[in-house]
Amino acid sequence: MSTASPVSLVTGGNRGIGRETARQLAGLGHAVLLSARRPEDAERAVADLAPGVPGTLLPCRLDVTDADDIHAIARRVEEEFGRLDVLVNNAAINYDTSQRAVSADLHEVRHTLETNLFGAWRTAQAFLPLLRRSPHPRVVNVSSESGSLELMSGGAPAYGVSKAALNALTRKLADELRAERILVNAVCPGWIATDMGGPGGDPVDQGVAGIVWAATLPDSGPTGGFFRKGEPLAW
């Protein structure tokens, strides 16, 4: 089915920040593919959210570490919509606060990079042909202050290094795609009260507002930036 509404894909969309991002984009009238590694998780999230939003929520299975999964979803989006307007690379794992860089399990670090960096990278590559068909293409890489070199400290090495690398990827993609009007930005939601973030953080809707801001920027908006709540964050 083709649609005049913006078409968005949110990876890791079944809970926390991804789920709320899908909800808010659908609330703006987007057709949102809400993805999860397990199809039943995506279906459950859509069943819970769909009655309360004016847009369309579509569940889909997507493991960003599986290239076949990614290309299957890209084919589905091409067949059903013919384009993608917004890609939100949200899927992430392993906030490894129990580890230190001096003694980190490098197998665990490599596993984290496979999702947090390479997952976003291969997803962006696979969807670029469809983003190029959009009149207002946007890529949002959900990052973290843990990846800021200026603010970085010890601890959580796998997660912090993966997010620093994701920030670097953001800069590379933004520069290479600038002439094609594809805006690519990294967004830190801040400390949010989710399963990964733990209790004590801000409500999830407040953190997600910055992601939605980046996903709906005007054509004159920034690209290649790192933001929190719409304000620049130190690299």
Image: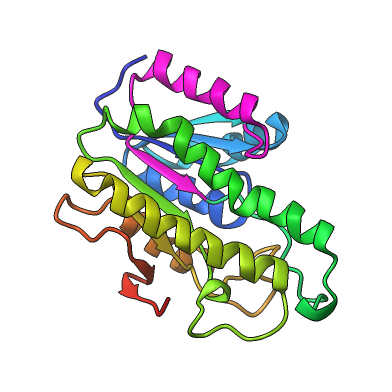
Residue 63 on image: x %, y %: 66, 36
Front-most of 176 and 21? 176
Quadrant of the rendered image containing residue 94: bottom right
Question: Can you tell which quarter of the image residue 38 is in?
Answer: top right
For the N terminus, the image quarter is top left
Q: Residue 229, position in %: x, y?
A: 37, 72
Front-lying residue, 89 or 61: 89
Q: Give the residue drawn at x 59%, y 53%.
A: 117
Q: Is residue 88 left or right of residue 54?
A: right
Residue at image point 41% right, 56% down: 170
Let me know if residue 217 is in the magenta part: no
- Give coordinates of residue 157: x percent, y percent: 71, 72
Position of residue 200 measured from the top left corner of the image (x, y, whole percent): 64, 80
Q: Is residue 158 above or below residue 2?
A: below
Judged left or right of residue 27, residue 103 is right
The C terminus lies in quadrant:
bottom left
Q: Going 81% across and 62% down the picture, which residue do you hit?
A: 106
Q: How many marks?
A: 0
**On screen, 93 above or below 62?**
below
Q: Is residue 56 visible?
A: no
The magenta span reads 62-89
The colour scheme applied to this rendered structure is rainbow
Between residues 115 and 15, which one lies in front from this camera angle? 115
